[in-house]
Amino acid sequence: MGRRGPTTLTARLAWVQTGVTVAALAVVAVGASIAVGAVITRKTDQQLESVTAGVASYLAGASSRDIDWHWLEGEIQEIRPADTRVEVRDRAGRLRLGVGEATDLGGVGVGCDVRGAARACGRRQGEFLVLAGRNRSDDLAARGELVLALAVASLIGGLIVALASRAVTRRAIRPLSDLAARVRVLEPGAGQRVAVPTDIVEVELLARRFDSLVARFEDALAREKRFTAEASHELRTPLTVARAEIEALARGEGNGGAGRRALAALERLASLVEALLWFARAQSRLDHDRMELVNLADVIRAELEELRRVHPGRAFAVELPDEALVRGDEHLIRRAVANLLDNAVKYGDAAPIEARLARSGEGAVLSVANRGPAVAPTAREQIFVPFFRGREDGGSGFGLGLPFARAVARAHGGDVELGAAREDGTEVILRLPLVAWNDLA
């Protein structure tokens, strides 16, 4: 069988409402039938036990030889209902007296029981067993008529609910339809919101959540537009320089300096493209199946060794454990750590660069601090915006190092932030979820 096509919420709710109503009516009908049957049985037993008690009172203290059976038959005729059969049997089970229409009461003992279509009750009095029974055919027929009437009523009720539920349901979910209509005409990036007035809490909540989603989408769209514009500007500058110098060389107007300037522009362009590629990779969703255990302490040691090689006169104050295992993409983590250390060297003064890796709860915390100019209070968050550069001269970088490091950290469940404001330098803190920690050397 093929897959059923989609159905409307109105139709689904109508079917559910109809099904629930019919099921409830069916339960009521079955329950009423059982209750009526129980009441009829109880009333019948009370009537039969009253008859057996009356007959037993006539037999109290008597024996077979003392009883006037003709007289007893007359007394039983007076106390028994017309549709009731009364029997008196001796200890051996032989019938000594039977009054009323023939109904098989054989085998009935003390108490009440069903014998075919009859209900019978028995009571022992001395050497006699008094039985009273009546045919229940009329009662069963009446109960059957009641069940039939309840079944017909249930079907009619279900039909009425089925006919009315679609209109009722359509009216009930009209706020959802209004919400869908409003969503359909929204223009992305136009600042519009759903704002459907309704007194239904769930619809209000859905509208607010959707507005929040639209706001986040517009923020992301605005960031992407700014990023694209900044990236285009940054790419255009070295391209323009390189093209101008190369054209000058082609016309024979340039000299050795023009070639060097063209190469420098192309080198800056290549560095920018590489930085953009790394930044794009940090923005992508991580493949958790390919993530591996990374010793963050070893990554920091390796990057520090590279910095010592490039800057042989630079001093570093380092405090690292033997092992700090995190789970993630080693290449991205290594690049983020390198950016933090490189920024500290680039914007620090001659004082040692401080790098300390510590444990905080379930996380590993890397603190990188320098003694250079402090970040202005107004720029503490702006420095994490791509292409923002806090130095007045613009610096030699692209403004992607810290945004890249933060993107990598957040992709791994951590974060990058500035430490407490200070006048004698800047501290940048990287946090990553910790898998294992070992302080032993």
Image (tube, rainbow, N blue to C red):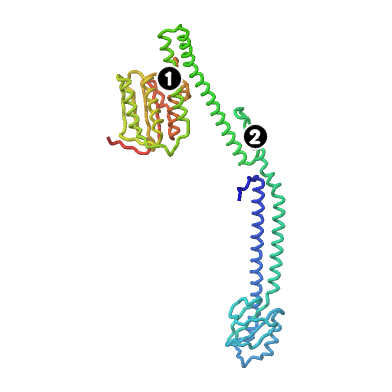
- Looking at the rendered structure, the kind of residue marked 1 is Gly
Q: In the image shown, does 156 or 423 lie closer to the viewer?
A: 156
Q: Which label's residue is closer to the chain start, 1 or 2? A: 2
Mark 1 in CB contact with mark 2 (< 8 angstroms) = no
* Residue marked by disc 2: 184
Q: Residue 280: percent from the left, percent from the top?
A: 47, 28
Res. 51 image quadrant = bottom right
Residue in the image at 42% along x and 11% along y = 259
SS under mark 2: helix
- Looking at the rendered structure, the kind of residue marked 2 is Arg
Furthest toward the bottom, the residue is 65
Graded by Cα atoms within 10 Å as few (under 14), some (14 to 19) or many (20 or more), the crowding at tag 2 reads few
* Residue marked by disc 1: 397
Res. 297 image quadrant = top left
Q: Is residue 230 left or right of residue 116?
A: left
Taking 313 as reference, is 216 above or below it?
Answer: below
* Residue 86 appears anywhere in the view: yes
Taking 117 as reference, is 410 above or below it?
Answer: above
Q: Residue 308: percent from the left, percent from the top?
A: 31, 23
